[in-house]
Amino acid sequence: MKCHRHRERDAVGVCIACGKGLCAETCAQDSDPGLHCDEACVRRLRTRERAGASPPGGWGWSTLMVVLGAALLYYGYRYSEWTMSVPNLLGMLFLWYGVVLLLQRAASRTPKT
Ligand SMILES: [Zn+2]
Ligand SMILES: [Zn+2]
């Protein structure tokens, strides 16, 4: 493999972000987080990782589910006591789903060691 910028030079490694060949003389930057072509390239990779790491929905969506579930449960309790009415069942479903989403997000925020 040849360097992506210098066709006459042999690549000593590839960028961890874009996978391009890098020559030892000028292109390879061997520092945190590894061999890479330039800072901008690594920044782009980190932005992509952040975007891809979060599960679908987001905080707003999961909080909405919990609030909606609590509201439906409250409504069901107020108007039909603790019977298996439609608002009660829907409320429990929303609340459960919202809590699961929140837990998933909390787990994904834990830094990897
Ligand atoms: Zn790169
Ligand atoms: Zn080069």
Image (tube, grey):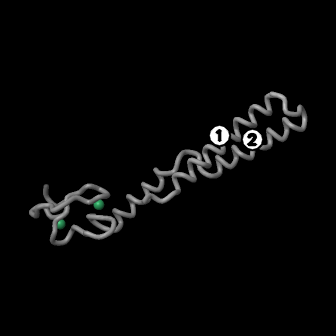
Is label 2 within 8 A of ligand 1 (CB to nearest ligand atom)?
Answer: no
Residue to which mark 1 is pinned: 97
Asked if residue 63 lies left or right of residue 17, the reply is right
Q: Quadrant of ligand 2?
A: bottom left
Residue at 44% from the left image edge and 58% from the top image edge? 112
The answer to which of 68 and 100 lies nearer the viewer is 100
Residue at 29% from the left image edge and 70% from the top image edge? 31
Residue most extreme to the front: 113
Q: Are marks 2 and 1 in contact (CB under 8 Å)?
A: yes
* Residue 61: image location, x then y, percent: 64, 47
Residue most extreme to the left: 8
In the picture, the disc for residue 36 is none
Quadrant of residue 84 within the rendered picture:
top right
Residue to which mark 2 is pinned: 69
Picture quarter with the C terminus: bottom left
Q: In the displayed structure, would residue 89 be above or below residue 27?
A: above
* Residue 106: image location, x then y, percent: 57, 53
Q: SS at mark 1?
A: helix
What's the distance in space between the residues labelled 2 and 1, CA to CA? 9 Å
Q: In the displayed structure, would residue 16 be above or below residue 99?
A: below
Amino acid carrying mark 1 in the image: Tyr
The answer to which of 60 and 80 lies nearer the viewer is 80
Quadrant of residue 44 within the rendered picture:
bottom left
| Structural crowding at the residue carrying mark 1, measured as other residues with C-alpha within 10 Å and reported as few (<14), some (14–19) or many (≥20) | some
Residue at 73% from the left image edge and 36% from the top image edge? 92
Asked if residue 7 lies left or right of residue 36, the reply is left
| Structural crowding at the residue carrying mark 2, measured as other residues with C-alpha within 10 Å and reported as few (<14), some (14–19) or many (≥20) | many
Amino acid carrying mark 2 in the image: Gly
